[in-house]
Amino acid sequence: MDAADMAHKASAPFKRMATRFRPNQVTPTPPIKTDENGAPLCVRCDADITQRRRIIVDAQRCADCQQDVENGNR
């Protein structure tokens, strides 16, 4: 067994563990704010963030408000 074989054997358990916890298996947190039909709303401007939460499951702000927060323009 050469060095490459030993490295492959040593890393196998870590590869199995990494594939068990994939980001798409994250349970989304419920939206803080919703409209009367239960659609998620931005906590800052009340914009509908349904599409954004399909990509970022924990999003609580629309893209514009999130950008403002990240730039320090709260």
Image (cartoon, helix red, strand yellow):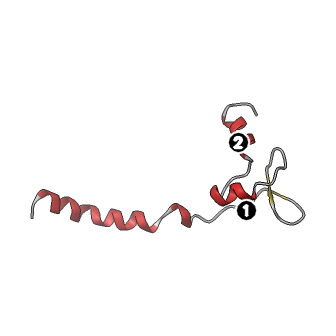
Q: Which amino acid does label 2 sit on?
A: Gln
The local crowd at label 1, few if under 14, some if 14 to 19, many if 20 or more residues have their Cα within 10 Å, is few
Q: Quadrant of residue 28?
A: bottom right
Total tally of numbered discs in the picture: 2
Circle 1 sits in a helix, a strand or a loop, which is it?
loop
Q: Name the residue under label 1.
A: 30
Q: Position of residue 24 (x, y in %)?
A: 55, 64
Residue 66 numbered tag: 2
Question: Where's residue 52, x and y in %?
Answer: 69, 54
Tag 2 and tag 1, C-beta contact below 8 Å: no
Q: Quadrant of the C terminus?
A: top right
Q: Is residue 48 left or right of residue 23?
A: right
State the residue in front, 37 or 28.
Answer: 37
Q: Which residue lies furthest to the right in this view?
A: 36
Q: Which residue is drawn at 71% across and 57% down?
A: 51
Query: Quick check: 5 left or right of 42?
Result: left
Q: Which residue is rendered at x = 81% and y = 62% of the image? A: 39
Q: Residue 3 location, x and y as percent?
A: 13, 57
Q: Is residue 42 above or below residue 13?
A: above
Instruction: Identify the residue at image location x=66%, y=36%.
Output: 70
Residue 22 horizontal/vertical position (percent): 49, 63
Q: Which mark is residue 16?
A: none
First reached walking from the N terminus: tag 2 or tag 1: 1
Query: Is residue 62 left or right of 7 when viewed as pictured?
Result: right
Question: From what the image shows, is residue 38 above or below residue 52?
Answer: below
Gap between marks 2 and 1 measured at Cα: 17 Å
* Rendered residue at 47%/65% (across/down): 21
